[in-house]
Image (cartoon, grey):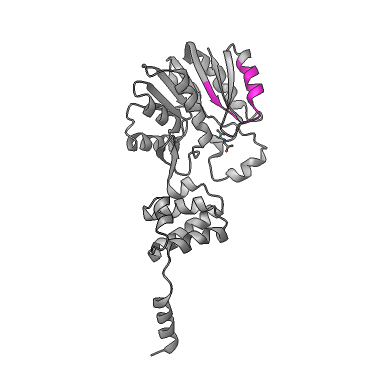
């Protein structure tokens, strides 16, 4: 027998198996946050973070460990966690996510919170423009079953993923329509129109870290104001008297946006800060 082959085989059999503990510890060297590593390993093993930490001596099968290490490398290269695991939570709803839609951000929950604060549970008509993965519309439909929620997007890919989430989350009452901003609203009017449009300026250095996500969902001309202004102008015709427009925007955009809303004839223009203390959502009344 070829002794070197026998040695290799013996060494393979006796090698320490991969354990949860050692796999999680590899995250640091890979440059991945430990929370992300726990979520990556949890997605592959079907275990939640508490289970992984409590039973960190458990062995992990070699193919699973190999996939985990490949996913650590993807994360280290800057790919959003949601694209790797295929899931991102928003408003405690597990949303399916894939390249081609913006990954929902926690700060966007403020837009949902404000809309819920403005309207009670009675039947209302609400539009979410540029819904992407359906995050905002899904949260509203879950919280307010009597509302009619219409979610629009221009992108085929976004509408596919939105439809998947509508089905998986059993939110069949949400209507999905294709079109840019108010294009898909016909002659209809609404109690509220919400949007988290692209608002990052084309020259913003922050874009360097957002290269995995669709630029059409992030970047807007005119220092990031082009889509905010286009929606504000078009939405007036689709809001009932007294209806509310709610827009997410960048931390430095509140002043110029408020001035434009007033110029367009909106009243009661108010900006709200996100949990990080940054200006994030502006609401205005028609
Ligand atoms: N808040 C996002 C970011 O800066 C931008 C989202 C958007 O443009 N709507 O990462």
Q: Position of residue 10 (x, y in %)?
A: 40, 81
For the image shown, how many numbered marks are present on the structure? 0
Image-based side of 170 in relation to 21, left or right:
left
Tell me where residue 3 sits by quadrant.
bottom left
Q: Quadrant of the N terminus?
A: bottom left
Choose between 215 and 33: the one closer to the eye: 33
Choose between 199 and 8: the one closer to the eye: 8
Residue 257 seen in the current view: yes
Bounds of the magenta segment: 246-261
Please tell me whether residue 97 belongs to the stretch shown in magenta.
Answer: no
Q: Position of residue 180 (x, y in %)?
A: 49, 27
Q: Is residue 143 above or below residue 236?
A: below
- Residue drawn at the location 43% of the way across and 75% of the way down: 15
Image-based side of 261 in relation to 154, left or right:
right
Please tell me whether residue 255 belongs to the stretch shown in magenta.
Answer: yes
Q: Is residue 228 above or below residue 79?
A: above
Q: Is residue 216 above or below residue 184?
A: below
Image-based side of 182 in relation to 149, left or right:
right
Q: Quadrant of ligand 1?
A: top right
- Residue drawn at the location 37% of the way across and 53% of the way down: 47
Q: Position of residue 122 (x, y in %)?
A: 37, 16
Residue furthest front as drawn: 54
Tell me where residue 210 sits by quadrant.
top right
Q: Is residue 159 above or below residue 53?
A: above
């Amino acid at each position: 027998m070829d002794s070197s082959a026998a040695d290799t085989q013996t060494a393979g059999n006796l090698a320490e198996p991969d354990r949860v503990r050692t796999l999680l510890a590899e995250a640091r060297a890979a440059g991945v946050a430990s929370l992300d590593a726990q979520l990556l390993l949890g997605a592959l093993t079907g275990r939640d973070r508490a289970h992984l930490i409590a039973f960190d001596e458990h062995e992990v099968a070699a193919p699973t460990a190999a996939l985990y290490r490949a996913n650590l490398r993807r994360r280290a290269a800057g790919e959003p966690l949601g694209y790797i695991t295929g899931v991102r939570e928003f408003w405690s709803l597990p949303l399916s996510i894939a390249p081609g839609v913006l990954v929902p951000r926690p700060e966007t929950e403020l837009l949902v919170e404000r809309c819920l604060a403005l309207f009670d549970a009675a039947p209302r008509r609400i539009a979410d423009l540029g819904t992407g993965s359906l995050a905002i519309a899904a949260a509203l439909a879950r919280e307010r079953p009597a509302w009619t929620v219409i979610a629009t997007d221009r992108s085929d890919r976004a509408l596919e993923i939105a439809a998947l989430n509508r089905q998986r989350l059993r939110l069949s009452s949400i209507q999905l329509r294709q079109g840019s901003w108010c294009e898909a609203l016909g002659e209809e009017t609404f109690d509220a129109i919400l949007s988290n449009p692209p608002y990052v300026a084309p020259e913003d250095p922050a874009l360097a870290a957002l290269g995995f996500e669709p630029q059409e969902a992030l970047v807007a001309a005119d220092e990031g104001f082009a889509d905010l202004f286009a929606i504000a102008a078009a939405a007036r015709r689709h809001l009932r008297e007294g209806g509310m427009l709610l827009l997410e925007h960048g931390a430095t955009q509140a002043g110029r946006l408020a001035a434009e809303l007033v110029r367009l004839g909106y009243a009661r223009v108010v900006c709200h800060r996100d949990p990080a203390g940054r200006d994030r959502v502006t609401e205005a009344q028609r």
